[in-house]
Image (cartoon, rainbow, N blue to C red):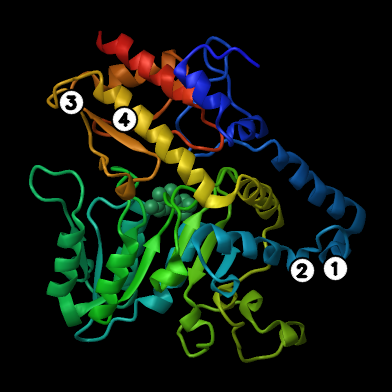
Amino acid sequence: MSAVSSPAAYLDATDPLAPFRQEFHIPAGPDGRPCVYFCGNSLGLQPKAARAAVEQEFEAWERLGVEGHFHGTSPWMHYHETLTEASARLVGALPVEVVVMNSLTVNLHLLLVSFYRPTGSRYKILMEGGAFPSDQYAIESQARLHDLDPAEVIVELVPRPGEHTLRTEDITAKIQELGDSLATILIGGVNYYTGQAFDMATITRAGHTVGAYVGFDLAHAAGNLEMHLHDWDVDFACWCSYKYLNSGPGGTSGVFVHEQFANRPDLVRLAGWWGHDPSDRFQMKKGFRPMAGAAGWQLSNAQIFPMAIHRASLDIVDRAGGMAALRRKSERLTEQLETLIRELALPSAQLEIITPADPAQRGCQLSVLVHQRGRELFDFLASQGIIADWREPNVIRLAPVPLYNSFEDVHRVGKALARFFK
Ligand SMILES: *Cc1c(COP(=O)(O)O)cnc(C)c1O
């Protein structure tokens, strides 16, 4: 039996996911030891399997040229299809409801083209105030695409005075208030800044009650939360793969379109040949006929190299036992981190955790609002080999992720914080 020297070491020794840490490259800190990487919410670490996965496609291209579309270990013609089942498991969807393609903001636009169809009386979009800028710009420009004024179209949800996060009852009340004027709801599954996870099932139900489409940007939710998009009746969603899904900078993106739209060729969309019915795709004829399901939103033939990395990453999630297993560990890691921060007993005028304390309302990330010496704290953490993330004006985001972070990592952060504030 190995000697276990501390409570954190004990938790790591009994953690069923601990072996997965070995499957990632962990960058070194200033002292040469592996850093504490709490930045998986921004860019996940590189799976060791990623290089071989890409290498395999280089090799196929080298050996087969154009024939790689039809031959080799994983013919490119059908490559994207090999990501479908794992992506469906990831977000709680049916395979027909998901497709992997493009990148996140591009997919947001493609989905809004179909699911934001303003009329004279129903034209508003509800979103969270302070959403990620790309989402704000996407929605503004979608309003302009319909010759509407973004200021009249966009309704932003903001926390009550003195609060940092949104209350579900305030979200549903706003939906009721907007009623027939509400065309579309688009909210992050998890807000990138506060780390708040929204009650997607309740928001979807409320949106449908007033006849609006409901979609989610899952950039900070995919690979972080357990989701049931199909059962929740969500209309559409998309996510990136390079944050909690470790699929490399600028990696590919996932899309969800609910089964109820699977056979709706009448839905307005931007079309391309890869979304066309494959039975006569290569007859190169006029007249777009979309494939059933989310696949019918594809434009271009698959980006094999980013998809190869994504496939290797999704495989790790599956081997780890899927989102249920990841989430079990994730809740414990975050709870430990929260406890260590609370034990500092700092006045809220100095430091506050703005992420909800309720585990059901957050993913792994804790956002710490540092009212004094914030930048100094961030730099101190960096000097200790702790990679966190700084958001202006004074928030430090700490994201312990279950696949490669350890309880020892959390302990190191707790010790560094205690040293800084002693
Ligand atoms: C990370 C993130 C993006 C980034 O969009 P890309 O198109 O992948 O550059 C967009 N929206 C949200 C909410 C994000 O968190």
Is residue 237 depicted above or below 392 in this figure?
A: below
Q: Label 3 is placed on what type of residue?
A: His
Residue 325 point in image, percent of width and height: 53, 46
Of the numbered discs 2 and 1, the one sitting upstream in the chain is 1
The number of numbered badges drawn on the structure is 4
Callout 1: CB less than 8 Å from ligand 1: no
Q: Label 1 is placed on what type of residue?
A: Phe
Label 1 near label 2: C-beta < 8 Å?
Answer: yes
Residue with the mark numbered 2: 77
Judge left or right: residue 265 versus residue 83.
Answer: left
- State the mark number for residue 338: 4
Where disc 1 sits, the SS reads loop
The residue depicted at 25 percent of the width and 12 percent of the height is: 421
Residue 373 point in image, percent of width and height: 23, 18
Residue with the mark numbered 3: 371
Residue with the mark numbered 1: 70
Where disc 3 sits, the SS reads loop
Of the numbered discs 4 and 1, the one sitting upstream in the chain is 1
Of the numbered discs 4 and 2, the one sitting upstream in the chain is 2
Find the distance from the CA under tag 3 to the CA under tag 4: 18 Å
Label 1 near label 3: C-beta < 8 Å?
Answer: no
Find the distance from the CA under tag 4 to the CA under tag 1: 51 Å
Of the numbered discs 2 and 3, the one sitting upstream in the chain is 2
Residue 107 point in image, percent of width and height: 48, 64
Q: Label 2 is placed on what type of residue?
A: Met
Q: Nearer the viewer, residue 366 or 144?
A: 366
